[in-house]
Amino acid sequence: MPIDEKDWSILDALRENAKLSRQQLARKTGLPVMTVHNRIRKLEREGVIKQYTVLLDHKKLGKALSAYMLVHVDTSVLGKGISREEYLKRLKVLPGIEEVKSITGHFDVLLKFRLRDMDELRDTLVGKLRKIPGVGNTETIFVLDDIK
């Protein structure tokens, strides 16, 4: 499905604020309301727009620590009654995990955490992650600034 300039202007406006009404989107993009409505429906139907979401202020929610963790997985665990997808789902249920990505390179998995503090990270890493069979070396990368 080709995406043209009008579609991109709608998508850009929605990424800025998914809460905008069709009328507000029409004003912002300079397109007629029915055009905006029809194009959004087409983008949803085609799966270009998968969902609408909320951008949270994590500090106000008590989750000020943001970190990424690279995880090496002992592949001998995979294939013994557990698929890669199932393994990733086991990681997804850890406290504070926002995203789990299967990646290429020296590590196999990238985890995105949002946690209260270093104590919660330690508890998650030592108390939970390390107990999952197949979890090998890890490297944690802390976010200093999050520019939106």
Image (cartoon, grey):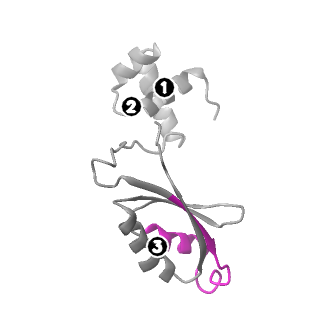
Q: Which mark is residue 10?
A: 1
How far across and down, in percent of the image, does residue 58 sit? 34, 49
Range drawn in magenta = 68-93
Rendered residue at 34%/32% (across/down): 19
Which SS class for mark 3? helix
Of mark 2 and mark 1, the one earlier in the sequence is 1
* Badge 3 vs badge 2, beta-carbon distance below 8 Å: no
How far across and down, in percent of the image, does residue 118 sit? 39, 64
Rendered residue at 42%/79% (across/down): 127
| Residue 105 relative to residue 38: left or right | right
Disc 3: which residue: 125
Q: Which mark is residue 17?
A: 2
Three-letter code for the amino acid on which mark 3 is drawn: Leu
Question: 35 or 124: nearer the eye?
Answer: 124
Residue 17 on the magenta segment: no
How far across and down, in percent of the image, does residue 83 sit? 60, 76
Label 1 neighbour load within 10 Å: few <14, some 14-19, many 20+: many
Three-letter code for the amino acid on which mark 1 is drawn: Ile
Between circles 3 and 2, the one closer to the viewer is: 3
Rendered residue at 54%/74% (across/down): 86
Rendered residue at 52%/23% (across/down): 9
| Residue 137 relative to residue 34: left or right | right
Of mark 3 and mark 1, the one earlier in the sequence is 1
Q: Quadrant of residue 36?
A: top left
Three-letter code for the amino acid on which mark 2 is drawn: Asn
Question: 136 or 20: nearer the eye?
Answer: 136
